Image (tube, grey):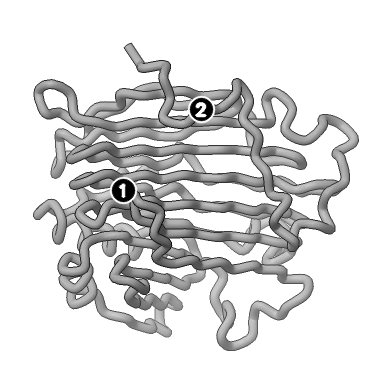
Amino acid sequence: MFKTDLKREFSDSPEVDFSHAREMAPYLEEPKAVYVGCPGKRGYLNLGFELDKDGKSILRELDRRAPLIVQQELYFDEELPGMPCVYILSSGGPNVDGDRYRQNITVKKDAMAFVSTGASTKLARMKYNYSGMIQHIDVEEGGYLEFLPEPIIPCENTRFICDTQMTVHPSATAFYSEIYMPGRKHHNNEVFKYDILSVCTNGLRPDGTPLFREKFIIAPKENQLRNAGCMGEYDVFANVVVMTPEDTAKKIYDATEAFIDKKNHIAAGVSHLPNGAGLLFKVLGMEPGPVKKIVRDFCSKVRMAVKGVPIPPEFPWR
């Protein structure tokens, strides 16, 4: 049985407010078909992982609202057979005008979890409004979380904003990755034709102490992404945040090399987050497959440093 007392008190259809985001001000027109955040367009997901009486990590809390779906945890990781693995699905197809989502993931003391998505997140063409998502990730003392969603694909004229808050205990580890495609690059060369992507990640301690804030706003129609210092010749961008203890971060940093592989058109780099929060890892490439592999290889280094085992090979159909 799943608990019904949620960590945060939300109404049956919690609000998702982006009124603070000035960059989305040009995209506030009400969609002509279905209004902003109506039932079926206001997705909500609450996942809570903790140890059971036998010390096994389980999915204890699960609450969801359409179109977000999670069924149950699976235990298929051969290197960490006691880690629950969960896939977030959507019954609504791509994100469209006026969609609002909220996702909460909590890993309690000494528990662990792997979370991903069942497929890439498609952001459909938008004419009036935008799609927005708020995420809260909480990892308590000694907890361990790997959150590796599949790539996000913004179609032409897409508007998307994502605000992620990571609250992580100094003894815990949270691995969070994002992979952004330039668009449907093999569909009429739809590369960097979206309107705007606004992505913000905040890191905090459980007592509310702020550690870092990273925000990037990508508006291809206003800025040349092919310039040096932006995307240059690359199409795919991965952003990875690892919040982990300082000694663990040093081990991972020392085991990770920055590189530019001009032959295979892929590059990666790693840096320290401020205030001893952990690491920031970025990857550039031309196709999602090689970029995903680099991200997983980096996640394997993190797992080795924390759990002493690597990540198993990706399933061939992923």
Judged left or right of residue 249, residue 11 is: right
Quadrant the N terminus occupies:
top left
Amino acid type, label 2 = Glu
Q: Earlier in the sequence, mark 1 or mark 2?
A: 2
Q: Is residue 225 above or below residue 314?
A: below
Q: Is residue 244 above or below residue 58?
A: below
Describe the element under mark 2 as helix, strand or loop: loop
Q: Is residue 80 above or below residue 212?
A: above
Q: In this view of the protein, can residue 176 be seen by the observer? A: yes
- At x 36%, y 72%, the residue is 273
Describe the element under mark 1 as helix, strand or loop: strand
- At x 35%, y 23%, the residue is 72
Amino acid type, label 1 = Glu
Q: How far apart are the two marked residues, 1 and 2, measured between alpha carbons?
A: 25 Å
Residue under label 2: 9
Residue under label 1: 146
Judged left or right of residue 216, residue 22 is: right
Q: In this view of the protein, can residue 289 be seen by the observer? A: no
- Which picture quadrant has residue 16? top right
How far from the left and from the top, in percent, is residue 252? 20, 69
